[in-house]
Image (cartoon, grey):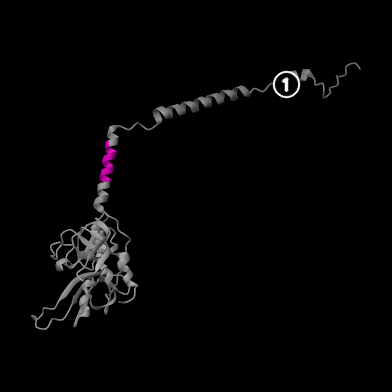
Amino acid sequence: MAGAAPLLTVDEPDESVLAEEPRPRWRRPRLLWILVLVCIVVFVAIWRLSDGGPAPLTQNDVDQAVRSGIEKAQAEERNTPPDAATAYRRILPSLVTVVSSAAPVTGTTAGAAKSSLGAGVIINADGAVLTALHVVDNDGKAGGKIQVQFADGTQANATIERRQPESDIAVLTVDQLPEVTVPAVIGGGAQVGDAVFPVGNPLGLRGSLTAGVVSALDRSVRSESGRTLKQLIQFDAAVNPGNSGGPLLDREGHVIGIVTALANPSQQPYFVGIGFAVPIATAGGAGGGPSK
């Protein structure tokens, strides 16, 4: 039929129509912007790595950092109390002075009663006192008595509740407690070279602390009573008569032993560099053992 438009089928598209369809123009500008952004990112990364990063350390920076570290450590050391001071403050409320005396022997000068001065520590909330047995042996003699004085000045009469002769340890009970009872903190075992601090009443100088180290372990010595004391801690801190029964402390102020003897080849009662203490694991066992 003349003048009729040609039929279009799906399989045969009109090439003239397709040829006239406009092409998209946004692809090239988008690609260009992507390239620009990539360049910017690369530039920023290079700038940060080169000029924008941290400056290298100089010798002056290192010296200043070292000086600052030393000054900080010195300030901390000045503000930290020495081990001895820490140990003493911790044990002081639990420290006890022990005096044992016997009645004068007939025919002797008046007032010549035999007495022993020692120390001890409170070991529980009931006010039981741990000390050396040889300090309080006078209680078995006629007219013998034991008196204790607590850190706050409270004085009381005491009796031996338990004895442990094989380790020269006694547990005392008192007839009057201080207003506040502060048991000592019990420590662990000792090692050779550990710092130790015995506290007691050497030569009557009450509440004295000395300092040293553990020299050896598992020592055996023969006491004045003829017994051989075993498994003792040997230390080099000064102790003298009046220290017996007092605590041997570690650097934290924990009780690791009970002072029992000093060695002196001249047989004189003064310190020549060797002291002994019963380990607290042995001494503390008296607190729960049977009476003897």
Amino acid of disc 1 = Glu
Quadrant of the image occupied by residue 171? bottom left
Residue 204 location, x and y as percent? Answer: 15, 69
Residue occupying image coordinates x 44% and y 26% = 46
The magenta stretch is: 63-72
Q: In the image shown, does 222 or 66 lie closer to the viewer? A: 222
The image quadrant where one finds the C terminus is: bottom left
For the residue carrying disc 1, how many other residues have a C-alpha within 10 Å: few (<14), some (14-19), or many (20+)?
Answer: few
The image quadrant where one finds the N terminus is: top right
Residue occupying image coordinates x 40% and y 30% = 52
Q: Residue furthest right?
A: 1
Q: In the image shown, does 95 or 69 lie closer to the viewer? A: 95
Residue 125 location, x and y as percent? Answer: 33, 72
Residue 287 location, x and y as percent? Answer: 32, 72
Q: Is residue 269 above or below residue 6?
A: below
Could you tell me if residue 89 is visible in this image?
no
Residue occupying image coordinates x 25% and y 58% = 196
Label 1 sits on residue = 21
